[in-house]
Structures are given as structure tokens and as C-alpha cells.
Image (cartoon, rainbow, N blue to C red):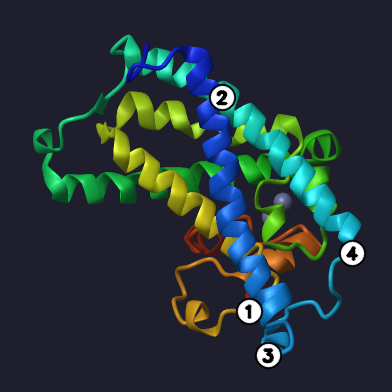
Amino acid sequence: MFYGFSHTEIWIIGTILFILRYVLIAGVFFYLFYVLKKTRFSKFKIQKQFPLKTQIKREQFYSLLTFLIYGCSLWLFVFWVEKGYTQSYSDLKEFGLVYFVVSILIMVFIHDTYFYWTHRLIHHSKFFKHIHKVHHGFTSPTPWAAFAFHPWEAIISLGFIPIILFVIPHHQWALVVFITFLTLYNVVIHLGYSIPKLKQFKILNTPDAHDFHHLKSKMNYGLYFTFWDRLMGTYYEG
Ligand SMILES: [Zn+2]
Ligand SMILES: [Zn+2]
């Protein structure tokens, strides 16, 4: 039992919450940019063609598959927390509010580094067509593509979670805030529309850079930041 829930209940509730968060965040951005303000924002559209309904359905299908896998992984993660194997804590006073915020920033940095290097790995010709080709099937992505992965890629994308669980002391709600931020940022880079304000922060990854990655594959492997790309010579300002 975890917070009074059985592991099966955690799996079901966790999966539903993953899906709801995705539908809410991707849905708001999609509705705003592709429906409500489509004409007004058209000058910011990065690639001029709009996605077909079949593409959006595929993006949603693969994302839902990803969340089923994420939901299953919760079973294992909760088991580790329950057994006291992890660095998880529930009393905010233990490390204080400043550390609560710092721990989220550490998670973002670890995730960005993990994402950059595993992303480069799955672009290797040995792995690409088996693992990452599904995500690159969307050459002009929409917010719904944020988690549209082949199941193998969904599993690989979870690999940084044990690093956080076992190495970084973290409040359980810090993890929830981080995963919500992850979802939000991932949706933003798949927006398909340029956000000029975001482009002013040179260190941040942008929809332009990630759109270019979907189109041309070989540059811009980062998620939140550009520094790994800049450091490794894989940056192209889309
Ligand atoms: Zn992508
Ligand atoms: Zn890629």
C-alpha cells in the first residue's frame, strides 16, 4: 500500500493522471494555436503546411501508448519508494523550501543531459529505424506529438528517473512539479509555431530548433537547453 492505494490502483490512477495532464496541456496549446488563433498566429507557423487529421490521430495514439508504459513503470518506482530504497522524502521541513526549488532545477539538468545523449544514441543508424523513426514520422509536429514514441523509446525515456530516485534527495511533490514542467516544455517545443520571446533566451531550446530537428534529423538534440548542442557542435538555430 502507498498512501492507502494498492499497486494496481497506483498504476491505474497514475496512468489516468499522465493522460489527463497531457490532454490538458497539449489540448490547450493545440486549441489556441491550431483552432482559436490559427489565422492571427499564422505568421509564426514554422512550416507552412498544417497537419492532416490522420497525423494528429497517430500522434495521440503513440502518446497514449507511452503513458500506458509510464503508468506501468510507476509500479516499480512506487515499490522502491515504499521499501525505502530511494532518496524520496515527504516532510518539506527536512530540506527546506529553497532546496525544494533547487532539486527541481537539478532534475531538469539531469533530464536534459540524459535526453541529449540518449537522443543522439537512438539516431545511430543501428537503432534509428527500430526505435526513433516513429517520432520522426511527424516531420511537422503538433503539440500532440510530444510523447509520440515507439514503446522502446518510451522505455528509454524513463531511464533518468532511477538516477533521480536513488541519487538526488527529492520531495515527492518536487517530482510531480518537475514532471508537469517536463510535459509543458515538451509540448512547447513540439508547438510548430515560433515563440519570439523564447528565442531571446539563447540557452533555451525552442519550437524552431526542435521543428528543424524533426525536419532534418541531424541537429538540435536537446530538450530544455541548447548548451549540449552548442558544446558538441550539433546546434542549428532553426
Ligand atoms: Zn520531437
Ligand atoms: Zn530525433
Q: CA distance from mark 2 to mark 4?
A: 31 Å
Residue at 48 percent across and 61 percent down: it is 225
Q: CA distance from mark 3 to mark 2?
A: 40 Å
Q: Is residue 150 above or below residue 28?
A: above
Mark 2 within 8 Å of ligand 1, using the beta carbon: no
Residue at 90 percent across and 55 percent down: it is 54
Going by the image, does 155 lie left or right of 167? right
Q: Which residue is mark 3?
A: 40
Residue 110, picture quadrant: top left
Percent across and percent down for residue 2 are 36, 16
Assign a secondary structure to mark 3. Answer: loop
Residue 46, picture quadrant: bottom right
Which quadrant of the figure shows ligand 1?
Answer: bottom right
Residue at 57 percent across and 27 percent down: it is 71
Assign a secondary structure to mark 4. Answer: loop
Q: Are the two marked residues, 3 and 2, in contact with CB atoms closer than 8 angstroms?
A: no
Q: CA distance from mark 1 to mark 2?
A: 36 Å
How many marks the image carries: the answer is 4
Question: Is residue 63 visible in the rendered structure shown here?
Answer: yes
Tag shown at residue 118: none
Q: Which residue is mark 4?
A: 52
Percent across and percent down for residue 53 are 88, 60
Mark 1 within 8 Å of ligand 1, using the beta carbon: no
Q: Which residue is mark 1?
A: 194
Q: CA distance from mark 4 to mark 1?
A: 20 Å
Assign a secondary structure to mark 2. Answer: helix
Label 1 Cα neighbours within 10 Å, binned few <14 / some 14-19 / many ≥20: many
